[in-house]
Image (spheres, rainbow, N blue to C red):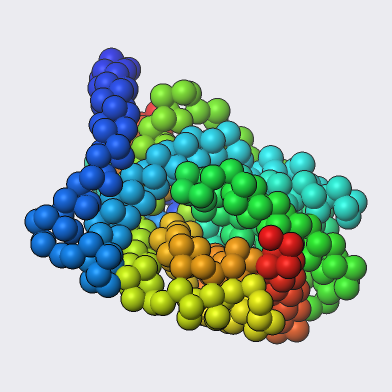
């Protein structure tokens, strides 16, 4: 590919992006009107009826969540092109507990992370001299404070709930890493990991700094990849949300997940853990739960359990940790989520 | 050139391997694509996040799927 064709293609891309923004704003603005028109005029459903409300929610929420997701993923992927796991690792190397845990939790939010990367990252950190407890803070924060979820919460429910989510997630990651570090569980790593740790630390990887147009290109790719992958989860989440919205009575929801019962938070966590969904897929459910009078603490606990404590990630981590370490890890995080749920049910 | 693709076998890693093979075929040169899914081997090479790709032992991409064009540009470069 010659430089000329590369330039003209990035100019074309730039033109598309300039067109995409007003289109986005227009679609977002007309979405509510169109959804009501489809549900109540085109399909002739009765407003305020169970079916009518469920269908209107479906037609309103699907474009809304997809539009917001596209924008959030674009911004998040763009920001992530500035973060490099190698540099994060070096910044955390030989940090003492406390400051190290705090930094690791913060880095956990912005570092691009997929659960299949958890193992090489885990070992790479330990091998470069990042303490086990600090590494755990990172491993808890990375999935639990999902950057896409954070952006979606901000866009859908405002900065207060987004800040609450990030703040409590950081607190859980910080504290559980601190506790796990004090337990000195290095000997509960699998044998081959202990062997790998004896090897010399690996030198710095040279990576080129991307240009601005390359960063935009990566962000567009990220949108295609992530939106293309998570839309089934979103549709499933919206279907559940629409059902809750149309059919589940408020009294039932307030009874199960309200703030006046001791069991509502553990119940929310128990429902959340086996549900493997994507951060974006859980948003419509959160929306419907809050709308039906579920308490904020219970809902937050539910969301964190779905995103932060997933079965597939636990299975992947069991390749490097012995059962006792895995069990401790999961219990400490689950305990943190429970505390957050109770705390917010009590004070809000 | 030796093209190594690192990844435990998730979707992204398979896509990366496919792109590497496409690039190798398009470039017309002598290239060999090898998939490495052993964690210990990845760690030994300093790979922190997957999928990753190395050319003649040098890690060029990690933590994202590179397009066939990007890999092709490196093969020709």
Q: Quarter-wise, where is residue A199 in the image?
A: bottom right
| Residue A311 in view (yes/no) | no
Identify the image quadrant of the N terminus of chain A: top left
Q: Quarter-wise, where is residue A72 in the image?
A: top left
Please give the name of the residue rendered at 71% of the width and 57% of the height, measured from the top-left corner.
Answer: A168
Residue A332 as seen in the image, left or right of residue A304: right
Of the pair B62 and A111, the residue shown nearer to us: A111
Q: Position of residue B10 (x, y in %)?
A: 43, 64
Q: Position of residue A256 (x, y in %)?
A: 55, 81
The correct choice, above or below, for A272 with respect to B75 in the image is below
Residue B72 as seen in the image, left or right of residue A102: left
Residue B57 as seen in the image, left or right of residue A192: left
Of the pair A128 and A27, the residue shown nearer to us: A27
The correct choice, above or below, for A18 with respect to A318 in the image is above
Please give the name of the residue rendered at 54% of the width and 69% of the height, measured from the top-left corner.
Answer: A294
Q: Position of residue A154 (x, y in %)?
A: 53, 45
Q: How many marks?
A: 0
The correct choice, above or below, for B62 with respect to A283 in the image is above
| Residue A249 in view (yes/no) | yes
Q: Position of residue B28 (x, y in %)?
A: 25, 40
Identify the image quadrant of the C terminus of chain A: bottom right
Please give the name of the residue rendered at 61% of the width and 40% of the height, measured from the top-left corner.
Answer: A84
């Amino acid at each position: 590919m010659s430089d000329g064709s590369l330039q003209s293609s990035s100019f074309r891309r730039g033109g598309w992006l300039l067109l995409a923004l007003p289109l986005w704003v227009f679609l977002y603005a007309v979405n509510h009107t169109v959804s009501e028109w489809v549900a109540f005029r085109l399909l002739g459903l009765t407003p305020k009826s169970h079916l009518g409300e469920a269908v209107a929610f479906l037609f309103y929420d699907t474009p809304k969540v997809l539009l917001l997701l596209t924008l959030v993923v674009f911004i998040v992927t763009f920001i992530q092109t500035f973060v490099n796991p190698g540099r994060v690792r070096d910044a955390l190397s030989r940090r003492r507990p406390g400051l190290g845990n705090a930094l690791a939790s913060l880095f956990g939010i912005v570092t691009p992370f997929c659960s299949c990367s958890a193992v090489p990252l885990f070992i790479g950190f330990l091998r470069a001299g990042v303490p086990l407890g600090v590494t755990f803070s990172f491993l808890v924060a990375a999935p639990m404070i999902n950057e896409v979820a954070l952006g979606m919460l901000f866009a859908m429910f405002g900065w207060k709930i987004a800040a609450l989510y990030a703040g409590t997630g950081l607190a859980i990651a910080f504290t559980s890493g601190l506790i796990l570090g004090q337990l000195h569980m290095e000997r509960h790593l699998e044998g081959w990991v202990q062997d790998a740790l004896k090897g010399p630390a690996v030198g710095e990887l040279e990576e080129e700094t991307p240009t601005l147009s390359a960063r935009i290109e990566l962000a567009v790719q990220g949108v295609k990849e992530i939106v293309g992958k998570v839309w089934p989860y979103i549709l499933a989440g919206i279907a559940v949300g629409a059902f809750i919205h149309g059919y589940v009575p408020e009294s039932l929801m307030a009874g199960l997940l309200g703030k006046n019962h001791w069991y509502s938070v553990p119940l929310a966590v128990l429902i959340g853990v086996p549900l493997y969904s994507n951060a974006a897929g859980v948003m419509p459910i959160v929306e419907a739960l809050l709308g039906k009078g579920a308490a904020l603490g219970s809902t937050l606990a539910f969301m964190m359990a779905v995103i932060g404590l997933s079965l597939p990630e636990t299975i992947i981590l069991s390749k490097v940790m012995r059962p006792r370490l895995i069990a401790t890890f999961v219990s400490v995080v689950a305990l943190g989520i429970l505390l957050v749920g109770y705390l917010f049910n009590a004070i809000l | 050139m030796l093209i190594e693709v690192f990844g435990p076998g998730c979707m992204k890693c398979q896509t990366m391997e496919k792109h590497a093979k496409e690039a190798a075929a398009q470039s017309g040169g002598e290239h060999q694509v090898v998939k490495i899914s052993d964690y210990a081997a990845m760690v030994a090479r300093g790979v922190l996040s997957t999928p990753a790709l190395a050319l003649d032992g040098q890690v060029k991409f990690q933590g994202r799927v590179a397009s066939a064009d990007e890999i092709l540009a490196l093969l020709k470069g």
